Structure formats: structure tokens, C-alpha cells
Image (cartoon, helix red, strand yellow):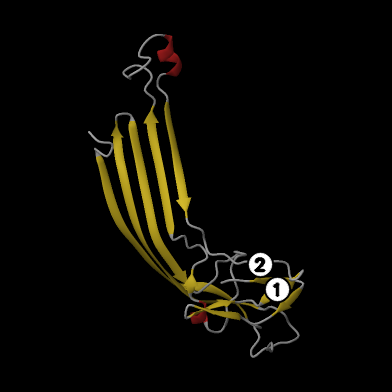
Amino acid sequence: MGPLSNSCAEPDYVGTKSTHLTALSDFNQPINGLRPYPTFGYIEYRSPTGNGSYNGLDLTLERRFQRDLTFRLGYTWSKSIDNVAEPLNTNSGNAQNGRTYTAWRGLSDFDIPQRVVVSYVYDLPFGKGKKMATSGPLMWLIGGFRTSGSYTYAAGRPFTVSSGQLEQRTGPVRRSHGGAEHYWSGGYTEQCGLLVLQLT
């Protein structure tokens, strides 16, 4: 019997749709370089206008307990998209245009496109009814033990590169690459001759 005998595989699809998510924006975001309320700085504005979606494919391979071993392997390939920032997440960038949330649509802050989890339980071959140390003092000392463990691999989440601000310049920074335009919102920071872009 092979190592995958007494095993089963199971594919699953998981999909969700979210509406009326809380969206945060700067009510005093500059328009054409000018703030609507110049005597104020950042004005946080909340509205239930966000939406999101999640689509994932789950693959599971499980070997039922046989010959002192059981294991389980799970793989997830997914994508989460929304147009709002995750609350209290310092890696979220500001919206390019807080008045048009469609321009903020992209990967969720918590999006993890790939994840692999492997776990196992193995009865050690010592003790009564096992291959070794089936009797005598060793059976009582090392018999009846098992080992188990798990390993998880996950692809990285989207993040925002940021730094302390000595000089802040507002307005989005745009770069064209391969026919696609990439935006870094929240402006950029110059510190000690270093240019730090805030990515979204």
C-alpha cells in the first residue's frame, strides 16, 4: 500500500460579496491643489459606501490514520478586492480621490493570494504492539509517545512603504509601466535626501 492509500482529496470554491463597508476619507482633501477648508488639516469622514469581493479555491488532501501516520495538506489560491482601507491598519494608503471610491479599488489590505498548510500526527514505533521496545523497561519509558507538527506558508500581503515626514508634498505620484499606470497616493516624503513613496 502506498503512502497515499486511504487518502481523499477535496476541492472547494469559496466566494463572498461585501457591501456597505465603512470607508474612511479626508473630507479636506485638496482639490486642484487647494484644500476646501484651508484653516483645517485632515478631516476624517466615514461613510458606508465601500464594497468588496473574495474568491478562493481550496484544495485539501488528507490521509486518514493508518500505519501510525495521518497528515493533512491544504492549499488556498484566492484574491480579495475592495475599495476601502482596513481600519487601524497603518499600511493602508489614502485614497487617490476620496470623493470617488471607484478609483481606490484594488487588492484588500489583508489579501493573501496563496497559502499552504501541512500538518501531521505520527505515533512513534515504540511500546506494546509497535515494532520496537515492545516489552520490558523501555516499553514503559518510551512507549506510547507521538509527535505532531504543522507548517504554514503564506504569500505576503500588500503594504505601504512609509517613513517619518520632514517635508510632505501632496498629490498623487504616477508612473507608467508596461502600458499600465501605477499610482502612489498620499504624495511623497523627502527625508535625508531619500524619496519614500507611499504605495497603494
Q: Residue furthest left?
A: 1
Callout count: 2
Q: Secondary structure at mark 2?
A: loop
Q: Residue at left 51%, top 58%?
A: 156
Q: Residue at left 60%, top 65%?
A: 91
- Find residue 152 and report its horizontal and vertical position in percent: 46, 47
- Find residue 7 and report its horizontal and vertical position in percent: 26, 41
Amino acid type at mark 1: Thr
Amino acid type at mark 2: Ser
Q: Which residue is mark 2?
A: 162
Q: Residue at left 62%, top 71%?
A: 198
Above or below for 178 versus 2:
below
Above or below for 44 versus 133:
below
Q: Earlier in the sequence, mark 1 or mark 2?
A: 2
Count residues near mark 2 (Cα–Cα under 10 Å), then give few for <14, some for 14-19, many for 20+: some
Q: Secondary structure at mark 1?
A: strand
Q: Quadrant of residue 32?
A: bottom right
Relative to 138, 2 lies left or right:
left
Instruction: Measure how far apart labels 1 and 2 are at the Cα level.
Output: 8 Å
Q: Which is nearer the eye, 200 or 101?
A: 200
Above or below for 101 versus 124:
below
Q: Which residue is mark 1?
A: 189
- Find residue 195 and report its horizontal and vertical position in percent: 69, 72
Q: Quadrant of residue 125?
A: top left
Quarter of the rendering occupied by the N terminus: top left
Q: Residue furthest front?
A: 178
Above or below for 53 versus 177:
above
- Find residue 170 and report its horizontal and vertical position in percent: 68, 81
| Marks 1 and 2 in Cβ contact (< 8 Å) | yes
Q: Residue at left 33%, top 53%?
A: 59
Q: Which mark is residue 178?
A: none
